[in-house]
Amino acid sequence: MASSHDGESSYFSYLDVFLLGVFILVLFLIVRKFRRRARGDDERVKKLQINPVIKQISSPVYSSSLSTSGSFIDKMKTRKKRVLILYGSQTGTGEEFSNRLAKDSSRLGLPAMTFDPEDCTDWDDLTRVGQEVEGSLVIFVMATYGEGDPTDNAQEFFDWLKETTDNLQGLKYTVFGLGNKTYEHYNEMGRYVDQRLEELGGERIYVRGEGDDDGNIEEDFITWKEGLWPEVMQYFKIDSSQATAVGREYEFSLHTEISTDEVFTGEPNRLGSYKNQKVPYNSKNPFLAPVTVIRELHKGGDRSCMHIELDITGSKLSYVAGDHVAIFPMNDPQQVERIGELLGIDLDSVFSLTNVDPEATKPHPFPCPTNKKLGATLLFFGCRNCAHDYLYQEELEEYESKGILSGLYVAFSREQIQFCRFVSRKEVWELIEGQGFFYVCGDARNMARDVQNTLLSIIKEHGGKTETEATEYIKKLQKRGRYLQDVWS
Ligand SMILES: Cc1cc2nc3c(=O)[nH]c(=O)nc-3n(C[C@H](O)[C@H](O)[C@H](O)COP(=O)(O)O)c2cc1C
Protein backbone atom coordinates (compact mmCIF):
# COMPACT_ATOMS: atom_id res chain seq x y z
CA MET A 1 0.00 0.00 0.00
CA ALA A 2 2.82 2.37 0.88
CA SER A 3 4.55 1.90 -2.44
CA SER A 4 1.35 2.62 -4.33
CA HIS A 5 1.13 5.92 -2.50
CA ASP A 6 4.68 6.81 -3.37
CA GLY A 7 3.96 6.14 -7.00
CA GLU A 8 0.83 8.20 -6.77
CA SER A 9 2.52 11.29 -5.42
CA SER A 10 5.36 11.25 -7.93
CA TYR A 11 2.90 10.82 -10.81
CA PHE A 12 0.91 13.79 -9.72
CA SER A 13 3.85 16.06 -9.18
CA TYR A 14 5.01 15.28 -12.74
CA LEU A 15 1.54 15.96 -14.08
CA ASP A 16 1.27 19.18 -12.09
CA VAL A 17 4.58 20.43 -13.44
CA PHE A 18 3.58 19.52 -16.97
CA LEU A 19 0.20 21.26 -16.74
CA LEU A 20 1.69 24.30 -15.05
CA GLY A 21 4.23 24.59 -17.84
CA VAL A 22 1.52 24.31 -20.47
CA PHE A 23 -0.66 26.84 -18.66
CA ILE A 24 2.18 29.36 -18.43
CA LEU A 25 2.90 28.80 -22.10
CA VAL A 26 -0.71 29.59 -23.03
CA LEU A 27 -0.51 32.81 -21.01
CA PHE A 28 2.71 33.80 -22.77
CA LEU A 29 1.16 33.28 -26.14
CA ILE A 30 -1.97 35.24 -25.34
CA VAL A 31 -0.14 38.17 -23.78
CA ARG A 32 2.42 38.36 -26.53
CA LYS A 33 -0.36 38.35 -29.05
CA PHE A 34 -1.92 41.41 -27.42
CA ARG A 35 1.36 43.19 -26.99
CA ARG A 36 2.37 42.75 -30.58
CA ARG A 37 -1.01 43.73 -31.88
CA ALA A 38 -0.70 46.94 -29.86
CA ARG A 39 2.59 47.65 -31.59
CA GLY A 40 1.04 46.98 -34.98
CA ASP A 41 3.62 44.31 -35.57
CA ASP A 42 1.45 42.30 -37.96
CA GLU A 43 4.31 40.41 -39.45
CA ARG A 44 5.21 38.66 -36.21
CA VAL A 45 1.62 38.23 -35.07
CA LYS A 46 1.03 35.85 -37.94
CA LYS A 47 3.30 33.37 -36.24
CA LEU A 48 1.37 33.48 -32.99
CA GLN A 49 -1.45 31.07 -33.34
CA ILE A 50 -3.32 28.90 -30.91
CA ASN A 51 -6.00 26.62 -32.15
CA PRO A 52 -7.76 24.59 -29.51
CA VAL A 53 -8.87 21.52 -31.42
CA ILE A 54 -11.91 19.60 -30.27
CA LYS A 55 -11.34 15.91 -30.83
CA GLN A 56 -13.64 12.99 -30.39
CA ILE A 57 -12.65 11.33 -27.13
CA SER A 58 -13.32 7.65 -27.34
CA SER A 59 -12.85 6.60 -23.75
CA PRO A 60 -12.88 9.27 -21.06
CA VAL A 61 -11.14 8.52 -17.80
CA TYR A 62 -14.27 9.26 -15.83
CA SER A 63 -17.63 10.82 -16.49
CA SER A 64 -18.89 14.04 -15.02
CA SER A 65 -22.39 15.14 -14.28
CA LEU A 66 -23.02 16.74 -17.66
CA SER A 67 -24.09 13.60 -19.40
CA THR A 68 -25.46 11.59 -16.53
CA SER A 69 -29.03 12.74 -16.04
CA GLY A 70 -31.68 10.06 -15.48
CA SER A 71 -31.01 6.72 -13.86
CA PHE A 72 -27.55 6.55 -12.42
CA ILE A 73 -27.72 2.77 -12.26
CA ASP A 74 -28.16 2.62 -16.05
CA LYS A 75 -25.23 4.96 -16.54
CA MET A 76 -23.06 2.98 -14.18
CA LYS A 77 -23.89 -0.23 -15.98
CA THR A 78 -23.35 1.06 -19.50
CA ARG A 79 -20.14 2.84 -18.55
CA LYS A 80 -18.92 0.05 -16.34
CA LYS A 81 -18.52 2.25 -13.26
CA ARG A 82 -18.39 0.89 -9.75
CA VAL A 83 -18.11 4.08 -7.74
CA LEU A 84 -20.72 6.83 -7.78
CA ILE A 85 -19.96 10.23 -6.26
CA LEU A 86 -23.05 12.28 -5.47
CA TYR A 87 -22.39 15.90 -4.62
CA GLY A 88 -24.45 18.62 -2.99
CA SER A 89 -22.57 21.78 -3.87
CA GLN A 90 -23.53 25.43 -4.23
CA THR A 91 -20.31 27.26 -4.99
CA GLY A 92 -18.32 24.38 -6.45
CA THR A 93 -15.99 23.17 -3.69
CA GLY A 94 -17.89 19.93 -3.15
CA GLU A 95 -18.16 19.40 -6.89
CA GLU A 96 -14.42 19.88 -7.32
CA PHE A 97 -13.68 17.46 -4.48
CA SER A 98 -15.99 14.94 -6.16
CA ASN A 99 -14.13 15.19 -9.44
CA ARG A 100 -10.89 14.56 -7.64
CA LEU A 101 -12.31 11.52 -5.87
CA ALA A 102 -13.50 10.16 -9.20
CA LYS A 103 -10.02 10.50 -10.66
CA ASP A 104 -8.38 8.83 -7.67
CA SER A 105 -10.85 6.01 -7.74
CA SER A 106 -10.49 5.34 -11.47
CA ARG A 107 -6.73 5.35 -11.14
CA LEU A 108 -6.92 2.80 -8.36
CA GLY A 109 -8.87 0.42 -10.55
CA LEU A 110 -12.38 1.37 -9.39
CA PRO A 111 -13.97 3.19 -12.35
CA ALA A 112 -15.97 6.12 -10.99
CA MET A 113 -18.39 8.81 -12.08
CA THR A 114 -19.70 11.95 -10.41
CA PHE A 115 -23.40 12.69 -10.41
CA ASP A 116 -25.42 15.83 -9.74
CA PRO A 117 -28.37 14.75 -7.54
CA GLU A 118 -30.50 17.32 -9.37
CA ASP A 119 -30.28 15.05 -12.43
CA CYS A 120 -31.67 12.02 -10.62
CA THR A 121 -35.13 11.06 -11.83
CA ASP A 122 -35.78 8.21 -9.41
CA TRP A 123 -34.22 7.90 -5.97
CA ASP A 124 -35.33 4.30 -5.92
CA ASP A 125 -31.98 3.76 -7.66
CA LEU A 126 -30.30 4.11 -4.30
CA THR A 127 -32.15 1.10 -2.94
CA ARG A 128 -31.08 -1.02 -5.93
CA VAL A 129 -27.55 0.12 -6.67
CA GLY A 130 -25.98 -2.23 -4.10
CA GLN A 131 -27.65 -5.26 -5.67
CA GLU A 132 -27.53 -4.26 -9.32
CA VAL A 133 -24.01 -2.90 -9.64
CA GLU A 134 -21.63 -5.49 -8.32
CA GLY A 135 -19.02 -4.25 -5.87
CA SER A 136 -20.39 -0.71 -5.96
CA LEU A 137 -19.74 2.18 -3.60
CA VAL A 138 -21.56 5.50 -3.30
CA ILE A 139 -19.66 8.50 -1.91
CA PHE A 140 -21.78 11.44 -0.75
CA VAL A 141 -20.07 14.84 -0.77
CA MET A 142 -22.48 17.22 0.95
CA ALA A 143 -22.18 20.93 1.75
CA THR A 144 -24.37 22.63 4.36
CA TYR A 145 -26.04 26.03 3.91
CA GLY A 146 -28.50 28.32 5.66
CA GLU A 147 -29.80 26.81 8.86
CA GLY A 148 -28.25 23.41 8.30
CA ASP A 149 -29.98 23.16 4.93
CA PRO A 150 -28.94 21.29 1.80
CA THR A 151 -27.60 23.01 -1.30
CA ASP A 152 -30.15 23.72 -4.03
CA ASN A 153 -29.03 20.75 -6.11
CA ALA A 154 -29.40 18.36 -3.15
CA GLN A 155 -32.80 19.62 -1.96
CA GLU A 156 -34.83 16.87 -3.67
CA PHE A 157 -32.46 14.18 -2.49
CA PHE A 158 -32.75 15.55 1.06
CA ASP A 159 -36.57 15.60 0.87
CA TRP A 160 -36.59 12.03 -0.38
CA LEU A 161 -34.17 10.88 2.30
CA LYS A 162 -36.32 12.39 5.07
CA GLU A 163 -39.53 10.82 3.80
CA THR A 164 -38.42 7.42 2.56
CA THR A 165 -38.86 4.19 4.44
CA ASP A 166 -37.07 2.20 1.71
CA ASN A 167 -34.60 -0.43 2.75
CA LEU A 168 -31.08 0.52 1.71
CA GLN A 169 -29.54 -2.82 2.57
CA GLY A 170 -26.71 -3.59 0.17
CA LEU A 171 -25.77 0.07 -0.25
CA LYS A 172 -22.10 0.64 0.60
CA TYR A 173 -21.39 4.27 1.29
CA THR A 174 -19.30 6.93 2.92
CA VAL A 175 -19.81 10.67 3.39
CA PHE A 176 -17.68 13.78 3.25
CA GLY A 177 -19.43 16.89 4.57
CA LEU A 178 -18.44 20.49 3.84
CA GLY A 179 -19.22 23.27 6.28
CA ASN A 180 -17.89 26.13 8.30
CA LYS A 181 -17.50 26.09 12.08
CA THR A 182 -18.58 29.69 12.47
CA TYR A 183 -22.12 28.61 11.57
CA GLU A 184 -24.43 27.30 14.24
CA HIS A 185 -25.50 24.28 12.19
CA TYR A 186 -22.02 23.06 11.45
CA ASN A 187 -21.86 20.35 8.78
CA GLU A 188 -25.41 19.33 9.51
CA MET A 189 -26.13 17.97 6.01
CA GLY A 190 -23.14 15.60 5.99
CA ARG A 191 -24.03 14.39 9.48
CA TYR A 192 -27.70 13.93 8.66
CA VAL A 193 -27.08 12.05 5.41
CA ASP A 194 -24.59 9.75 7.12
CA GLN A 195 -26.86 8.94 10.04
CA ARG A 196 -30.01 8.56 7.89
CA LEU A 197 -28.38 6.20 5.38
CA GLU A 198 -27.29 4.00 8.26
CA GLU A 199 -30.78 4.06 9.77
CA LEU A 200 -32.20 2.88 6.45
CA GLY A 201 -29.84 -0.09 6.33
CA GLY A 202 -26.90 1.25 4.31
CA GLU A 203 -23.43 0.06 5.23
CA ARG A 204 -20.87 2.76 6.00
CA ILE A 205 -17.56 1.35 4.85
CA TYR A 206 -15.44 4.32 5.88
CA VAL A 207 -15.87 6.95 8.56
CA ARG A 208 -17.49 10.28 7.62
CA GLY A 209 -15.13 13.17 6.94
CA GLU A 210 -15.83 16.81 7.73
CA GLY A 211 -14.25 19.83 6.07
CA ASP A 212 -14.21 23.18 7.85
CA ASP A 213 -14.11 26.14 5.50
CA ASP A 214 -13.16 28.40 8.40
CA GLY A 215 -10.00 26.33 8.92
CA ASN A 216 -8.33 24.47 6.08
CA ILE A 217 -10.96 22.57 4.15
CA GLU A 218 -8.44 21.35 1.56
CA GLU A 219 -6.31 19.75 4.26
CA ASP A 220 -9.38 18.18 5.91
CA PHE A 221 -10.36 16.68 2.58
CA ILE A 222 -6.89 15.35 1.76
CA THR A 223 -6.49 13.81 5.22
CA TRP A 224 -9.87 12.11 4.91
CA LYS A 225 -9.27 10.72 1.44
CA GLU A 226 -5.81 9.47 2.33
CA GLY A 227 -7.46 7.11 4.77
CA LEU A 228 -10.38 6.35 2.45
CA TRP A 229 -8.63 4.59 -0.40
CA PRO A 230 -6.65 1.96 1.56
CA GLU A 231 -9.87 1.11 3.39
CA VAL A 232 -11.84 0.86 0.14
CA MET A 233 -9.16 -1.29 -1.52
CA GLN A 234 -9.15 -3.59 1.46
CA TYR A 235 -12.93 -3.78 1.61
CA PHE A 236 -13.26 -4.69 -2.05
CA LYS A 237 -10.15 -6.89 -1.85
CA ILE A 238 -8.40 -4.99 -4.59
CA ASP A 239 -4.72 -5.65 -4.93
CA SER A 240 -2.79 -2.39 -5.18
CA SER A 241 -0.98 -3.84 -8.20
CA GLN A 242 -4.35 -3.68 -10.01
CA ALA A 243 -4.18 0.09 -9.79
CA THR A 244 -3.77 1.52 -13.25
CA ALA A 245 -2.21 4.79 -14.28
CA VAL A 246 -4.58 6.78 -16.44
CA GLY A 247 -3.68 9.00 -19.36
CA ARG A 248 -3.19 12.72 -18.94
CA GLU A 249 -6.22 14.94 -18.87
CA TYR A 250 -4.99 16.94 -21.87
CA GLU A 251 -3.64 15.98 -25.22
CA PHE A 252 -0.89 18.24 -26.46
CA SER A 253 -0.10 18.81 -30.13
CA LEU A 254 2.16 21.32 -31.90
CA HIS A 255 1.12 23.16 -35.08
CA THR A 256 3.41 24.49 -37.74
CA GLU A 257 0.99 26.08 -40.19
CA ILE A 258 -2.35 27.50 -39.26
CA SER A 259 -4.50 30.48 -40.31
CA THR A 260 -4.54 33.52 -37.98
CA ASP A 261 -8.35 33.52 -38.18
CA GLU A 262 -8.30 30.36 -36.12
CA VAL A 263 -6.23 31.83 -33.31
CA PHE A 264 -7.89 32.35 -29.94
CA THR A 265 -6.78 35.43 -28.02
CA GLY A 266 -8.44 34.67 -24.71
CA GLU A 267 -12.06 34.32 -25.84
CA PRO A 268 -13.84 31.76 -23.69
CA ASN A 269 -15.84 30.27 -26.54
CA ARG A 270 -16.42 31.99 -29.90
CA LEU A 271 -13.41 32.96 -31.96
CA GLY A 272 -13.06 36.74 -32.29
CA SER A 273 -15.90 37.38 -29.83
CA TYR A 274 -14.01 40.21 -28.10
CA LYS A 275 -13.34 42.05 -31.35
CA ASN A 276 -16.71 41.34 -32.86
CA GLN A 277 -19.19 41.65 -29.98
CA LYS A 278 -22.63 40.13 -30.62
CA VAL A 279 -25.74 39.50 -28.51
CA PRO A 280 -26.79 37.40 -26.65
CA TYR A 281 -24.18 37.90 -23.94
CA ASN A 282 -23.51 35.43 -21.18
CA SER A 283 -20.54 33.95 -19.33
CA LYS A 284 -19.40 32.16 -22.49
CA ASN A 285 -19.86 35.27 -24.61
CA PRO A 286 -18.99 38.14 -22.27
CA PHE A 287 -19.84 41.75 -22.98
CA LEU A 288 -16.81 44.01 -22.53
CA ALA A 289 -18.36 46.82 -20.49
CA PRO A 290 -16.37 50.06 -20.24
CA VAL A 291 -15.73 51.42 -16.74
CA THR A 292 -17.45 54.81 -16.48
CA VAL A 293 -17.02 55.66 -12.79
CA ILE A 294 -14.33 54.59 -10.41
CA ARG A 295 -13.94 56.04 -6.95
CA GLU A 296 -12.47 55.08 -3.60
CA LEU A 297 -15.06 54.79 -0.85
CA HIS A 298 -12.66 55.06 2.08
CA LYS A 299 -11.68 58.64 2.69
CA GLY A 300 -8.36 57.89 4.35
CA GLY A 301 -6.45 55.17 6.16
CA ASP A 302 -4.85 52.18 4.48
CA ARG A 303 -7.98 50.26 3.56
CA SER A 304 -9.54 50.29 0.14
CA CYS A 305 -13.03 49.66 -1.17
CA MET A 306 -13.83 50.78 -4.70
CA HIS A 307 -17.13 51.93 -6.15
CA ILE A 308 -17.10 51.03 -9.84
CA GLU A 309 -19.77 51.69 -12.47
CA LEU A 310 -19.86 49.79 -15.73
CA ASP A 311 -21.72 50.87 -18.84
CA ILE A 312 -23.85 48.03 -20.21
CA THR A 313 -25.67 50.15 -22.79
CA GLY A 314 -26.50 48.16 -25.89
CA SER A 315 -25.71 44.84 -24.26
CA LYS A 316 -29.34 43.91 -23.54
CA LEU A 317 -28.04 42.78 -20.16
CA SER A 318 -29.72 43.65 -16.90
CA TYR A 319 -28.19 43.45 -13.46
CA VAL A 320 -29.94 41.79 -10.55
CA ALA A 321 -28.62 41.44 -7.02
CA GLY A 322 -26.32 38.44 -6.80
CA ASP A 323 -25.08 38.71 -10.41
CA HIS A 324 -21.34 38.62 -10.94
CA VAL A 325 -19.04 40.86 -12.94
CA ALA A 326 -15.80 39.39 -14.28
CA ILE A 327 -12.58 41.33 -14.63
CA PHE A 328 -10.44 40.77 -17.70
CA PRO A 329 -6.86 41.47 -16.59
CA MET A 330 -3.68 41.28 -18.66
CA ASN A 331 -0.21 40.20 -17.65
CA ASP A 332 2.74 42.54 -17.77
CA PRO A 333 4.37 41.69 -21.16
CA GLN A 334 7.87 42.32 -19.80
CA GLN A 335 7.36 39.78 -17.06
CA VAL A 336 5.98 37.26 -19.52
CA GLU A 337 9.00 37.80 -21.75
CA ARG A 338 11.34 37.33 -18.79
CA ILE A 339 9.68 34.12 -17.58
CA GLY A 340 9.84 32.79 -21.14
CA GLU A 341 13.58 33.41 -21.17
CA LEU A 342 14.09 31.82 -17.76
CA LEU A 343 12.14 28.71 -18.73
CA GLY A 344 13.80 28.54 -22.13
CA ILE A 345 10.43 28.32 -23.87
CA ASP A 346 9.88 29.35 -27.47
CA LEU A 347 6.99 31.77 -27.11
CA ASP A 348 6.22 31.52 -30.81
CA SER A 349 5.29 27.85 -30.56
CA VAL A 350 1.77 27.12 -31.67
CA PHE A 351 0.04 24.25 -29.98
CA SER A 352 -3.33 22.77 -29.05
CA LEU A 353 -4.51 21.30 -25.81
CA THR A 354 -7.38 18.88 -26.00
CA ASN A 355 -9.32 18.51 -22.80
CA VAL A 356 -10.32 14.96 -22.12
CA ASP A 357 -12.26 15.86 -18.97
CA PRO A 358 -15.86 16.80 -19.73
CA GLU A 359 -16.57 20.08 -17.95
CA ALA A 360 -19.12 20.31 -15.18
CA THR A 361 -21.65 23.06 -14.63
CA LYS A 362 -22.10 24.93 -11.34
CA PRO A 363 -25.39 25.92 -9.83
CA HIS A 364 -26.14 29.57 -9.17
CA PRO A 365 -24.48 30.36 -5.83
CA PHE A 366 -27.20 32.42 -4.17
CA PRO A 367 -30.93 32.77 -4.57
CA CYS A 368 -31.79 36.36 -5.48
CA PRO A 369 -33.93 38.47 -3.09
CA THR A 370 -37.46 39.32 -4.16
CA ASN A 371 -38.71 42.83 -4.62
CA LYS A 372 -41.37 43.93 -2.13
CA LYS A 373 -42.93 47.24 -1.21
CA LEU A 374 -41.23 48.34 1.99
CA GLY A 375 -42.70 49.44 5.31
CA ALA A 376 -40.57 50.97 8.06
CA THR A 377 -36.92 50.38 7.22
CA LEU A 378 -34.11 50.75 9.74
CA LEU A 379 -30.48 50.48 8.71
CA PHE A 380 -27.73 49.79 11.24
CA PHE A 381 -24.27 50.38 9.86
CA GLY A 382 -21.05 49.92 11.76
CA CYS A 383 -17.43 50.41 10.80
CA ARG A 384 -14.11 51.44 12.33
CA ASN A 385 -13.67 55.07 11.58
CA CYS A 386 -16.22 57.68 10.51
CA ALA A 387 -13.81 59.75 8.43
CA HIS A 388 -12.32 56.78 6.55
CA ASP A 389 -14.70 53.86 6.44
CA TYR A 390 -18.23 55.22 6.32
CA LEU A 391 -19.06 53.71 2.92
CA TYR A 392 -21.81 55.40 0.91
CA GLN A 393 -22.23 58.05 3.60
CA GLU A 394 -23.73 60.66 1.25
CA GLU A 395 -26.14 58.20 -0.34
CA LEU A 396 -27.34 56.75 2.97
CA GLU A 397 -27.88 60.16 4.51
CA GLU A 398 -29.82 61.24 1.45
CA TYR A 399 -32.03 58.11 1.72
CA GLU A 400 -32.76 59.00 5.32
CA SER A 401 -33.56 62.64 4.56
CA LYS A 402 -35.91 61.58 1.75
CA GLY A 403 -37.65 59.09 4.05
CA ILE A 404 -36.58 56.05 2.01
CA LEU A 405 -34.92 54.87 5.21
CA SER A 406 -37.04 55.52 8.28
CA GLY A 407 -33.97 55.32 10.51
CA LEU A 408 -30.20 55.28 9.96
CA TYR A 409 -28.08 54.17 12.92
CA VAL A 410 -24.31 54.27 12.60
CA ALA A 411 -21.57 53.33 15.05
CA PHE A 412 -17.78 53.63 14.80
CA SER A 413 -15.57 51.32 16.80
CA ARG A 414 -12.25 53.13 16.56
CA GLU A 415 -13.18 56.73 17.16
CA GLN A 416 -11.50 58.59 20.03
CA ILE A 417 -14.91 59.64 21.21
CA GLN A 418 -17.47 56.93 20.62
CA PHE A 419 -20.71 58.28 19.24
CA CYS A 420 -23.74 56.57 17.92
CA ARG A 421 -27.49 57.00 17.75
CA PHE A 422 -29.56 54.52 19.67
CA VAL A 423 -32.76 52.88 18.62
CA SER A 424 -35.27 51.83 21.22
CA ARG A 425 -35.26 48.09 21.84
CA LYS A 426 -39.03 48.25 22.09
CA GLU A 427 -39.23 49.65 18.55
CA VAL A 428 -37.18 46.72 17.24
CA TRP A 429 -39.46 44.27 19.03
CA GLU A 430 -42.58 45.93 17.60
CA LEU A 431 -41.18 45.76 14.09
CA ILE A 432 -40.41 42.05 14.43
CA GLU A 433 -43.81 41.31 15.89
CA GLY A 434 -45.35 43.31 13.05
CA GLN A 435 -44.07 40.76 10.52
CA GLY A 436 -40.72 42.53 10.07
CA PHE A 437 -37.71 41.01 8.32
CA PHE A 438 -34.14 41.00 9.64
CA TYR A 439 -31.18 41.07 7.25
CA VAL A 440 -27.69 40.68 8.67
CA CYS A 441 -24.67 41.17 6.45
CA GLY A 442 -20.97 41.19 7.28
CA ASP A 443 -18.62 39.51 9.74
CA ALA A 444 -19.83 36.07 10.86
CA ARG A 445 -17.44 35.48 13.72
CA ASN A 446 -18.31 38.43 15.96
CA MET A 447 -20.83 40.83 14.47
CA ALA A 448 -23.47 38.29 13.41
CA ARG A 449 -23.30 36.55 16.79
CA ASP A 450 -23.51 39.82 18.71
CA VAL A 451 -26.53 40.87 16.65
CA GLN A 452 -28.24 37.56 17.36
CA ASN A 453 -27.50 37.80 21.10
CA THR A 454 -28.85 41.35 21.21
CA LEU A 455 -31.99 40.28 19.40
CA LEU A 456 -32.36 37.39 21.83
CA SER A 457 -32.25 39.74 24.80
CA ILE A 458 -34.78 42.10 23.14
CA ILE A 459 -37.17 39.20 22.59
CA LYS A 460 -36.77 38.12 26.22
CA GLU A 461 -37.21 41.63 27.56
CA HIS A 462 -40.08 42.89 25.43
CA GLY A 463 -41.69 39.61 24.42
CA GLY A 464 -41.64 38.31 28.01
CA LYS A 465 -39.98 35.07 26.92
CA THR A 466 -37.52 32.73 28.58
CA GLU A 467 -34.09 32.05 27.03
CA THR A 468 -35.37 28.80 25.45
CA GLU A 469 -38.52 30.44 24.12
CA ALA A 470 -36.55 33.35 22.69
CA THR A 471 -34.13 30.94 20.97
CA GLU A 472 -37.10 29.06 19.52
CA TYR A 473 -38.59 32.36 18.38
CA ILE A 474 -35.42 33.22 16.42
CA LYS A 475 -35.34 29.72 14.91
CA LYS A 476 -38.89 30.20 13.69
CA LEU A 477 -37.95 33.55 12.15
CA GLN A 478 -35.06 31.81 10.38
CA LYS A 479 -37.25 28.98 9.12
CA ARG A 480 -39.77 31.45 7.73
CA GLY A 481 -37.03 33.40 5.97
CA ARG A 482 -37.53 36.44 8.19
CA TYR A 483 -34.06 36.34 9.74
CA LEU A 484 -31.63 36.18 6.85
CA GLN A 485 -27.87 36.28 7.05
CA ASP A 486 -25.26 36.85 4.38
CA VAL A 487 -22.24 36.59 6.61
CA TRP A 488 -18.69 35.36 6.23
CA SER A 489 -15.49 35.05 8.18
C1 LIG B 1 -24.37 31.76 2.80
C2 LIG B 1 -23.64 30.59 3.40
C3 LIG B 1 -24.27 29.82 4.37
C4 LIG B 1 -23.59 28.75 4.95
N1 LIG B 1 -24.20 28.03 5.95
C5 LIG B 1 -23.52 27.05 6.56
C6 LIG B 1 -24.11 26.33 7.65
O1 LIG B 1 -25.23 26.55 8.08
N2 LIG B 1 -23.37 25.33 8.22
C7 LIG B 1 -22.11 25.02 7.81
O2 LIG B 1 -21.50 24.13 8.38
N3 LIG B 1 -21.53 25.69 6.77
C8 LIG B 1 -22.19 26.69 6.15
N4 LIG B 1 -21.62 27.36 5.11
C9 LIG B 1 -20.27 27.00 4.66
C10 LIG B 1 -20.28 26.11 3.40
O3 LIG B 1 -20.92 24.88 3.63
C11 LIG B 1 -18.83 25.84 3.00
O4 LIG B 1 -18.26 27.07 2.60
C12 LIG B 1 -18.68 24.82 1.90
O5 LIG B 1 -17.32 24.60 1.65
C13 LIG B 1 -19.34 25.25 0.60
O6 LIG B 1 -19.27 24.19 -0.33
P1 LIG B 1 -19.65 24.37 -1.88
O7 LIG B 1 -18.63 25.33 -2.45
O8 LIG B 1 -19.53 23.01 -2.47
O9 LIG B 1 -21.03 24.92 -1.99
C14 LIG B 1 -22.28 28.43 4.53
C15 LIG B 1 -21.68 29.19 3.52
C16 LIG B 1 -22.34 30.26 2.97
C17 LIG B 1 -21.65 31.07 1.90
Image (spheres, rainbow, N blue to C red):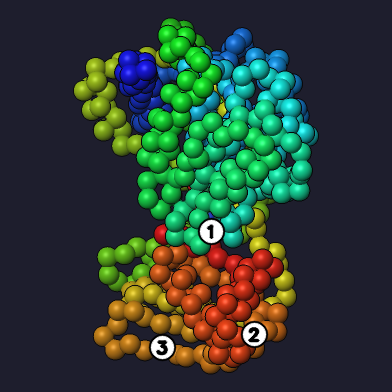
The furthest residue to the top: 256
247 and 398: which one is in front? Answer: 247
71 and 54: which one is in front? Answer: 71
| Front: mark 2 or 3 | 2
Q: Residues within 10 Å of mark 1 (few under 14, many from 20)?
A: some
Q: Is mark 1 within 8 Å of ligand 1?
A: yes
Q: Position of residue 100 (x, y in %)?
A: 48, 29
On residue 167, which mark appears? none
In the drawing, does residue 28 fall left or right of residue 172?
left
Q: Position of residue 333 (x, y in %)?
A: 31, 33
Quarter of the picture holding the C terminus? bottom left
Q: In this rendering, is residue 416 above or below 237?
A: below
Q: Position of residue 240 (x, y in %)?
A: 43, 13
Q: Position of residue 264 (x, y in %)?
A: 50, 24
384 and 67: which one is in front? Answer: 67
Amino acid at the residue labelled 1: His
Residue that numbered label 1 is attached to:
185
Residue that numbered label 3 is attached to:
420
Q: In this rendering, is residue 332 above or below 265?
A: below
Amino acid at the residue labelled 2: Leu
The first of marks 1 and 2 along the sequence is: 1
Residue that numbered label 2 is attached to:
431
